[in-house]
Image: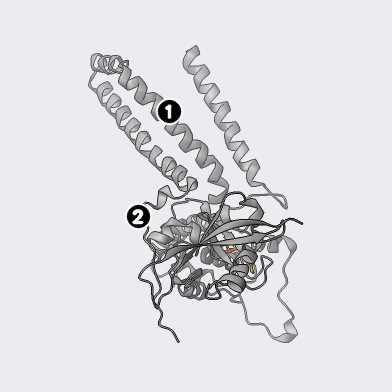
């Protein structure tokens, strides 16, 4: 098998030395099967061991290898160098997130948001072991399944200019996961999560750019979660407005 | 441990960075033309309230080439606005079920287009026939 070479331009940032990030170009040999992630690993192993980036599973499961390739958010383990040849690649850390070092971003903000939506089932009633498990029909499961596929890769945050402009916005994946639990027939946490949905920085921070759903590698369609919740937020407002005073307490 | 100094990249000019964003801005800007058209229509209504002569003068003024250009652009903008909205509508509505089967997003989009064309054809037919 013949080996070809491709130029990979990487955005580098060393918080101890650099005042701002700058590009560095590496020449990387590749074959038909070489993923972009493997290209970066070649750089780290053979050319410059200080290059910093995240990965783990190498199979679109862990969600840690997201980066911008030529301005588009991708999982680098499932993007292939051959698809960019004979052009070159420009690899940058995920947009809209602070750069920690080189290609690694600071995920703290998302993790706090994820925690805030209570991403677990808040049961309707307390059940003892004797009561057995909560049962769910396939049709009930169907209502949330797509949203439960999220791997927290943050590609959707890198796609969302509203999040880039105001990082207070809850953002696509956190809203998708919020919707995932709210739509679960076993869950009774909707009222607790509603203030997050209703906030100016909840669903109303979204202007339906729609790029989040375009780049999501798992078909989660976070834009639909956000925008369906605009409907529920409106209804929630309306009913609270209509209900006699104190009725919602 | 090394000092942390996370770098936040500037957002200036973000919408020029990706064709998807450019199209988004185009979609949003259609609202300006739709608003201008609505204002112009309101003005027409106002002229009608004054009397027939005023309304006729207004109608005649619409023949001006600049107005024709504006109307063509406004029509294109309104169509783009409507069509892009049709495409995202399935994302903004509750999931629809027919029996136990979920109605596909594609179907929802096509039904809207179908209604759009049938109603538009009926309206055009009415306007030209009447
Ligand atoms: S919604 Fe999709 S793009 Fe966003 S974090 Fe989850 S898997 Fe990644
Ligand atoms: S390395 Fe796990 S998703 Fe790419």
The residue positioned 37% from the left and 67% from the top of the image is A20
The residue positioned 51% from the left and 40% from the top of the image is B84
Whether residue A189 sits left or right of residue B42 in the image: it is: right
Q: Is residue A114 above or below residue A83?
A: below
Q: Nearer the viewer, residue B14 or A143?
A: B14
Q: Is residue B45 above or below residue A41?
A: above
* Residue A22 spot, x, y in % from top left: 42, 64
Quadrant in which the C terminus of chain A appears: bottom left
- Chain ID for label 2? B
Q: Gap between marks 2 and 1, in whole Å?
A: 31 Å
Ligand 1 picture quarter: bottom right
Which class describes the residues within 10 Å of circle 2: few (<14), some (14-19), or many (20+)? few
Q: Is residue B86 above or below residue A152?
A: above
- Chain ID for label 1? B
* Residue B35 spot, x, y in % from top left: 34, 36
Tell me if I can see residue A19 in this picture.
yes
Work out whether mark 2 precedes mark 1 in sequence or the reverse, and give the earlier one. 2
Q: What residue is shown with label 1?
A: B75
Q: What residue is shown with label 2?
A: B12
* Residue A197 spot, x, y in % from top left: 46, 64
């Amino acid at each position: 098998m013949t080996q070809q070479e491709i130029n990979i331009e990487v955005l580098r940032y060393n918080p101890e030395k650099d005042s701002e990030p700058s590009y560095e170009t590496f020449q990387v040999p590749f074959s038909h099967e070489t993923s972009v992630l493997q290209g970066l690993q070649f750089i780290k192993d053979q050319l410059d061991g200080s290059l910093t980036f995240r990965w783990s599973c190498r199979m679109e499961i862990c969600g840690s290898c997201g980066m911008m390739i030529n301005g588009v958010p991708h999982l680098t383990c499932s993007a292939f160098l051959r698809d960019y040849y004979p052009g070159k690649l420009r690899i940058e850390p995920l947009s809209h997130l602070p750069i920690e070092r080189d290609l690694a971003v600071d995920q703290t903000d998302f993790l706090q948001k994820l925690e805030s939506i209570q991403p677990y089932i808040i049961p309707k009633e307390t059940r003892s072991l004797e009561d057995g498990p909560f049962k769910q029909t396939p049709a009930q499961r169907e209502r949330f399944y797509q949203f439960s596929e999220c791997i927290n890769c943050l590609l959707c945050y890198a796609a969302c200019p509203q999040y880039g402009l105001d990082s207070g916005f809850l953002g696509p994946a956190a809203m998708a996961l919020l919707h995932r639990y709210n739509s679960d027939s076993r869950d009774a946490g909707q009222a607790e999560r509603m203030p997050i949905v209703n906030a100016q920085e909840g669903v109303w921070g979204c202007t339906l750019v729609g790029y989040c759903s375009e780049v999501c590698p798992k078909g989660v369609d976070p834009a639909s979660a956000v925008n369906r919740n605009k409907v529920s937020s409106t209804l929630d407002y309306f009913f609270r407005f209509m209900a006699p005073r104190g009725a919602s307490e | 441990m090394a000092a942390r100094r996370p770098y936040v990249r500037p957002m200036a000019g973000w919408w020029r960075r990706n064709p998807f964003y450019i199209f988004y801005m185009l979609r949003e800007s259609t609202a300006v033309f739709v608003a201008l058209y609505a204002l112009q229509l309101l003005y027409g209504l106002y002229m009608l309230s004054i009397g027939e002569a005023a309304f006729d003068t207004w109608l005649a003024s619409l023949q001006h080439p600049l107005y024709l250009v504006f109307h063509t652009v406004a029509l294109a903008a309104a169509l783009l606005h409507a069509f892009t909205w049709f495409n995202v509508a399935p994302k903004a509505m509750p999931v629809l079920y027919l029996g136990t089967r979920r109605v596909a997003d594609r179907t929802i989009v096509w039904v809207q287009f179908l209604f759009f064309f049938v109603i538009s054809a009926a309206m055009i037919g009415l306007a030209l026939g009447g």
